[in-house]
Amino acid sequence: MASNKEPHIDAHTTVIVEWRGPYSYRDIADNPSWGRGLYFATGRVRYGRVATIHYCGFTEGSYVTRLRNHHKVHEINREQEFWLGEVVCPSDGSRYFLERAESMFIWFWLPRLNDKKTKHPPTPTTLINWWIRKNGEPRLRRHPMCRDLPDVVSWDGEYWRTGNVNVWRG
C-alpha cells in the first residue's frame, strides 16, 4: 500500500501469519519480550476427550502478560499449549490486521471458548497461515494439532474458499 492509512473497510485484504509453536506457558513466561501478535490455545478442557484448538486471540503487548490471567485460557486444564502468530504481511502488523486475522480464524474454526466476535461475519479477507518450527525453520509437514486448519482461508462476503500449500526446499 502506498499510504499509511488503514485500507477502506470494504476492501478485500490478504493477511499472512507466521505461526510458531507449540509452546508451553513456561516457554512464554521465560521470554517476556515476545508479544504483539496472535495466539491460539490448545489442549483439553474439563471432560474433553481430545486436545484441540479452543481459543484464538491477539495482544498488542507481551504474550505472558496477556495469558497470565486470561479470562478463558485457564479452562484448558490439560495438555495446554500455545501457538504464537506474527503478521508478516502487511509488514506493519497493526491492530487492524491482527483483528482481521483473528476474526477470520474465529469464524472459520469456531473455537469452543471464543464466544465473542461470532455475531457478525468477518470483513472480506484472505488469511494465509505459514507454519514455522520453534527454531525458525518452515514446517514441511503440519503439526497434528493444526492438520485440520487450512493454510489458506478466504472469505469474500458470500463464499468461503480454503486450501493447503505444499512446502518444499528450493
Image: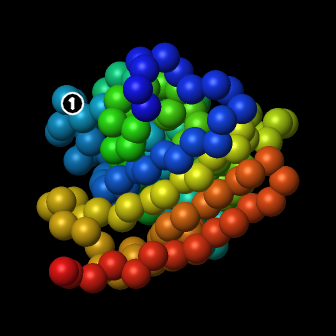
Farthest-out residue, top? 5
- Scheme of image coloration: rainbow
Q: Is residue 141 above or below residue 116?
A: below
Instruction: Residue at 69%, 66% (x, y): give it.
Output: 161
Quadrant location of residue 94?
A: top left
Residue 34 in view, yes or no: yes
Where residue 36 appears, as percent x and y from the top left, is 35, 30
Q: Amino acid at mark 1?
A: Pro
Instruction: Judge from the rendering whether residue 73 lies leftward or rightward of residue 59; answer left or right.
Output: right
Instruction: Residue at 35%, 22% (x, y): give it.
Output: 61
> Which quarter of the rendered picture does the C terminus lie within?
bottom left
Quadrant location of residue 9?
A: top right
Instruction: Residue at 37%, 55% (x, y): give it.
Output: 19
How crowded pointer 1 is (Cα within 10 Å; few <14, some 14-19, many 20+) is rated as few
Q: Nearer the viewer, residue 54 or 93?
A: 93
> Which quarter of the rendered picture does the N terminus lie within?
top left
Q: Is residue 49 above or below residue 21?
A: below
Q: Nearer the viewer, residue 66 or 97?
A: 97
Q: Nearer the viewer, residue 24 or 18?
A: 18
Label 1 element class: loop
Instruction: Judge from the rendering whether residue 97 lies leftward or rightward of residue 26; answer left or right.
Output: right
Where residue 116 appears, as percent x and y from the top left, is 73, 34
Where residue 117 appears, as percent x and y from the top left, is 73, 35
Farthest-out residue, front? 2
Instruction: Residue at 25%, 68% (x, y): give it.
Output: 138
Q: Nearer the viewer, residue 148 or 127?
A: 127
Would you name the residue on which mark 1 appears? 32
